[in-house]
Image (cartoon, grey):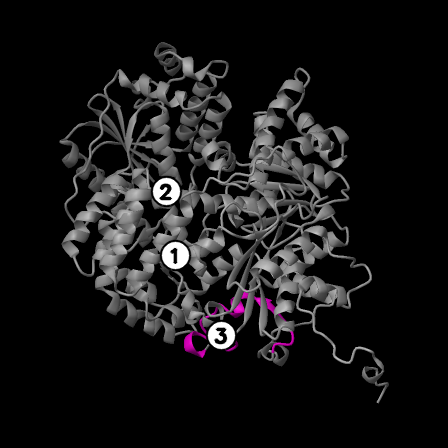
Amino acid sequence: MGINFKKRSLKKIIEIETHPRKIYEKLDRQANKGQLRDIQIKILDKWYAEYKDNKDVILKLPTGEGKTLIGLLILQSKINKGEGPAVYLCPNKYLVKQVQTQAKEFGVPFCSLDSNLPSDFVDGSKILICTSSKLFNGRSSNFGIGQNSIDISSILLDDAHSCIEIIKQSCTIKIKRENGNYYNELFSLFRQELKKQGMGTFLDIENESSNSILAVPYWDWYEKIEEVTKILYKCNSDVDKVKDIWFPWEIIKDNLKDCLCVFTGKEIEITPYKLPIKKFRSFFKARHRVFMSATLSSDSFFIKDLGVEKKVIENPLTFNQKWSGERMILIPSLIDESLSREIIINWIAKIHKNKNFNYGIISLVPSFEQAKIWEGAGAKLVKSETIEDEINKYKNEDFNNLLVFANRYDGIDFADSLCRILILDSEPQNESISEKYYASCIGNIEEQKIKKSQTIEQGLGRAVRGEKDYCVVLIIGNDLIKRIRYKNNLEYFSNQTKKQIEMGFQLAEFAKEDKDYNEDGFKVLSSIIRQSLKREEDWKNYYDEQMNSINNTNIYSNINEIIKLESESEELYENNKYKEASKKVQNIIDNYLNNDEEKGWFLQKKARYLYPIDKIQSCKIQISAHQKNKSLFLPQNGYEVTKISLIDQKRNDNIKKNFNKYSLFSDMMIDLENLLSKLSFGVPSEKFETAIDEIGKFLGFVTDMPDKYWKTGPDNIWAIKENYYLCIECKNEVLETRVYIEKDEVGQFNTNIAWFNREYKNPKAKYAMIIPTKKINKNAAFSNPVVIMTRKKLDKLSKNIKSFAINFKELDLNQVTVEFIEEALKSHKLTSDDIISGLYWENSEY
């Protein structure tokens, strides 16, 4: 029976502590786990005194400051107070194991989720630690959906921004083309309207292009929702073939009218405009919810996606600490123009292969496609199933492999020697089809800039996980450099990261000033990297001085209010309060928006809200929306194509105006290099066509993208000179092994030429196609003479444009004369006559 210690104790009643700091003092933690850090004590005291009774709390702390332990102690406090059950949610299994390990080391009682909910969790005696997908799940047999949900008192979302993405995935139906006839049924249902929204893109989708995207206009979706529901119902019953519908179907089956449907040539994505968070009642009705976040600039999306009130966003539980840890950000191409992305990849891979390292080197890339160059250089691509093994090798000091992660910007930590060099390679991409659609419509509005900046910041945060941790970060890829180079984009990062990026620009200038004459770029870069890794005192002192000068300001004066109103308007629409929803959106347009692109986007929302009750007014508003933002849905009727033109003497003035946008030549070259990198066969068509448009503008021409803006006509038009046009059809995704230009491609261009001649009243023009082959299949014929730009000619154009730009390297861009521009155009074969000459084009042939 053992000894009855209770009757021998002076304290007959054992008090259960509820203050998390006092709870920690009594935990049976491992011997190497000492006292709480000062920052942890202050946060826990503040939570207990001011936040413990609030429904929602946002806990914001820099990476590596012990948020996990703080979160566990907060949940244990609730359990000790008798307010269970409590669950700690992580975005992935890897983080679940990390949190469980910490809980075990610190002596915090916890349980795991198997097939059934543990009784220790249900009776509120232990914290359940599991992935967020276990709760946010349309077929969850554990937590339930809707009225069948179990009650949970306290919920903590670790890395809450990542959890939002998981919730979105759980509410999104995906139907692949290969899965039976369901794709084809839906494609046929919307065929006619999709054609109207972009004939060229429609044909690309019909021919199974995965890069081409078309969204179903809200009016066609609304009118055919009954047919859609029947098709999806059948699809859901065929779960053996279409597994990606089974889980989300239960969540959105009764609210399909409130969804966006987007097609590519490979799959369909159907996703709610607003997350149906109320369906997850265990989460929605929880009495205390904690959202853990790094010190990112904005938590605004918690309002729209998680139903958090605006006042919670603006009053986070945080500690006023300016910065933590040391991050030396270097941009090699700014240090030396020769240090391009490809050269850096091969250089870093080579030195890693030839030297024994006592630390890890990590590269983060946006996609598996962009990881291929790293693999080719000898790096190890880490996949979901190998993450744990590869990280364990690093933990065991096996640093033989340079590790590459594709589209993994959060959820994995590389503290201390696990990563001393982090390479952030190229700009993160939108993963889901719907996000790509939104980006194509409103890529430059504030909400999209915040999302992109947060992803970049999450990537930067992988390698510095504590106050004394340090790392060198190499930024490569012209699109990423362009993103952080613009001051307006830089403002969307946290103050700590913004200062570190600004220092990166400074270090590039210092390197140029201090380098020896003709010193090799690699040698300069290596020397700077060593200054951090060798822990030079002068560098550390400089870093401390710069970081201590941070001014803690935040520019988001309106974004929280905009997102709040937007969320409210969407909820009104879901509840069939169409007029009230449209008034909310009009409030945003009238009081918070400055540019036409944003106004057009919200006008389209208003038109969607009004469509069920006033189709005529909805159509009028859609016309206004499209006039302000040509990337939106083309109205059903009532629009007029805006024709472009160029007066000859204005071309050089246009180039001069373009130059005047830049204060530094290097800024202009970053933009140009980014554009030229997209002028390549195999690049997604949308990026290629946009680059052709922007190159035309760079060369001083007036340009248009009819297929994108007017949903018909050629991909690109350049007004080359007065009353003369270059009409371009882009087929850059065609394989370079292709022998012929096929009949459907010829027919498509013939149709687009006919549209162009009709709208422009038979102008003088050169009709051109960018495609790897100049041979036309014998069963096809162009209606007009068509010239071809092959890879060789495309490379020649890119080379001449770059050499033209380098001509201005030593000049003040704001003082360049039109006469100098004219001479430079002649010298580099870029006059209007050169552009349409045989220099860049070949005749098509049979």
The stretch drawn in magenta includes residue 683 = no
The stretch drawn in magenta includes residue 140 = yes
Q: Which residue is mark 3?
A: 140
Q: Secondary structure at mark 3?
A: loop
Could you tell me which quadrant the C terminus lies in?
top left
- Position of residue 670 measured from the top left corner of the image (x, y, whole percent): 49, 29
In the image, residue 497 sits, relative to residue 121, either above or below, namely above
Work out whether mark 2 precedes mark 3 in sequence or the reverse, and give the earlier one: 3
Work out whether mark 2 precedes mark 1 in sequence or the reverse, and give the earlier one: 1
**Which amino acid lies under the numbered mark 1 shown in the image of this protein?**
Lys
The image quadrant that residue 521 belongs to is top right
Q: Nearer the viewer, mark 2 or mark 3?
A: 3
How many residues crowd mark 3 within 10 Å: few (<14), some (14–19), many (20+)? some
Q: Are marks 1 and 3 in contact (CB under 8 Å)?
A: no
Q: Secondary structure at mark 1?
A: loop
- Position of residue 426 measured from the top left corner of the image (x, y, whole percent): 52, 40
Residue 266, numbered circle: 1
Q: Secondary structure at mark 2?
A: helix
**Which amino acid lies under the numbered mark 3 shown in the image of this protein?**
Ser
**Which amino acid lies under the numbered mark 2 shown in the image of this protein?**
Glu
In the image, residue 279 sits, relative to residue 616, either above or below, namely below
- Position of residue 539 measured from the top left corner of the image (x, y, whole percent): 71, 30
Q: Nearer the viewer, mark 2 or mark 1?
A: 2
Give the alpha-carbon distance from disc 2 to disc 1, as whole Å: 16 Å
Give the alpha-carbon distance from disc 2 to disc 3, as whole Å: 39 Å
Residue 82, numbered circle: none
In this rendering, position of residue 571 left or right of residue 810 = left
Q: Which residue is mark 2?
A: 686
In this rendering, position of residue 696 left or right of residue 542 = left
